[in-house]
Amino acid sequence: MSEMDTILKSVILSFSAMVLFFSGYLLRHFFASKRILVAEKQAREMQALAERESETRRKEIELAGKDLMLKLRQDFEAETKSRREELVAAEKRIAQKEEGLEKRVDLLEKKEKDISGRVAALHGQEVSVKQEEEKLTKLIEEEKQRLQAISKLTPDEAKQLLLSRLSDELTHEKATMIRKMEDEARDTAEKKARQIISTAIQRCASDQAVETTISVVPLPSDEMKGRIIGREGRNIRSLEMATGVDIIIDDTPEAVTISGFDMVRREIARMALENLISDGRIHPGRIEEVVEKAKKDMEGKIKEEGEKAAFELGIHNMHPELLKLIGKLRYRTSFGQNALQHTKEVAQLIGSMAIQLGLDPKIATRAGLLHDIGKVVGQDVEEGTHAIVGANLARKYGETEDVVKAIESHHEEVEMSSLYGVLVCAADTVSAARPGARAETLVTYVKRLESLEAIANSFKGVEKAYAMQAGREIRIVVDPEKINDDESIVLARDIRKRVEEEMEYPGQIKVIVIRETRSIEYAK
């Protein structure tokens, strides 16, 4: 029984398995068919959707293409219309130009005909003029022959006579013109020049500065004199040798005099002596040390004086070497006038005059401050006047050509090429010629007067010449039979030119020519 049960169970199990298999197959087939149907439906829907989208896209593309074609057509039509209008306008312009050209051609043809007519007329006139010239030439020759026969003069003699008469007439006309020009210049230039110079002087009026050849050093007591002299005079000899001045110890109470023409050496000696007196140690070794220190201090003082002068005048960016040269002017005099004070006066005067004349006051002031630096270099440079030497130094240290030219021409040794040179010359003269500015020696004064009279007496027709007003005026008496009124005017100008060329003088010199005719009779 058990074996049959087992087989039966096996059969039932096999049958159950087959039933399950077929059931699963059927279920799978059912679900698969259903999915296929769903997929086919989705595919059809997607196909339909794609067809609708493609149709919509196609329609949009067609519309866009139509719009583009329409726009291109409109642009083409607009461009075509514009080109057509341009062509029409160009045709109008061409037509107008053609009309203008035709008118010009007509006008040129008319002018050509007119010119041809004029040329023909001129040709006829030329022929007639030649004929008239031939007639005039014959008449002139006949007139010359008649004049020669009447005057009994050769052509050369007649020329000489005519030239002589013309020379007299020209002398008269020249004198008249000179008198007229001088009157006009005097009415305008003199008034303006006096106004400018007087204004400049008012703006920079300064005190008189007169330097001497001695310096006085005060002493704390008379006992110090013996210490300065030293044993057997060795201290005073060392000080004199080191400084190059004379130390004068006399009966003046509590004072020592330093004498010397070199103001720099005299100032160094004064500084050294004051330092020795305050220190109290006076012996040859100490003297040399103090003198060397005083020399260095003097260099600094000189530079400081130059910088101070430039600062007072508002001048900047000047080379240090030029400032040193300006500072040295503080210790130099010319006819008793301090050179630095004179230089500052000139700079102030020329600056004021430059403003009134519309020139650059900075350039003018620099030229005025530097115009006398050539006086302080001594024998350290090549030979030449102080104006030339100063100009070379200014050029060397970077000054502008306007400044250089003004310096080298302020004594008229070089031709003046600008108004700055004229102003430096004028300001230099004003500063030197003002009352009390300079102390002139009697010998120099007499020589200048003699030279002035000698120049006047060297001209023909001059009887006497007198220098007046301390050399500021010269009066010339001429022979009235040799010099007429017109020639006296020319003579005054010639004498003035000779004085300007051959003499150096401050201020100006007035030249007066006197022509006097006297008729004398004696009653008996």
Image (cartoon, rainbow, N blue to C red):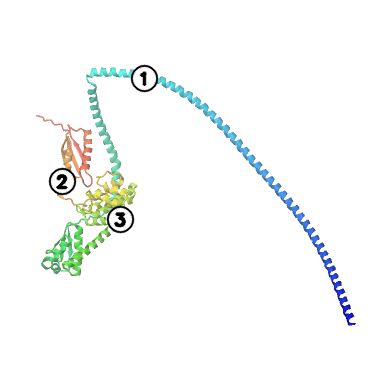
Query: Would you name the residue on which mark 3 appears?
Result: 319
Q: Nearer the viewer, residue 2 or 226?
A: 2
Q: What SS does tag 3 mark?
A: loop
Report if the CB atoms under discs 1 and 3 are less than 8 Å apart: no
- The quarter holding residue 304 reads bottom left
Residue type pointed to by label 3: His
The crowding category of the residue bearing disc 1, from other C-alpha atoms within 10 Å (few below 14, some 14 to 19, many at least 20), is few
Vertical relation: 267 (above or below) 122: below
Residue type pointed to by label 2: Lys
Q: What SS does tag 1 mark?
A: helix
Vertical relation: 273 (above or below) 478: below
Q: Earlier in the sequence, mark 3 or mark 2?
A: 3
Q: Of the numbered discs in the image, which one, if any, rests on residue 453?
A: none
The alpha-carbon separation of the residues under discs 1 and 2 comes to 71 Å
User: How far across and how far down the image is residue 354, in percent?
Assistant: 32, 48
**Direction from residue 404 to residue 242 in the image, left or right:** left
Q: Residue at x 20, y 60 (%)?
A: 267
Q: Nearer the viewer, residue 8 or 397?
A: 8
> Which residue, as the protein is rendered here, is positioned at the far left?
524
| Res 353 visible | no
Query: Would you name the residue on which mark 1 appears?
Result: 130
Camera-near label (3 vs 2) is 3
- The quarter holding residue 176 reads top left
User: How far across and how far down the image is residue 257, in percent?
Assistant: 15, 62
- The quarter holding residue 416 reads top left
Quarter of the C terminus within the rendering = top left
Q: Earlier in the sequence, mark 1 or mark 3?
A: 1
Query: Would you name the residue on which mark 2 appears?
Result: 447
Q: Residue at x 90, y 82 (%)?
A: 1
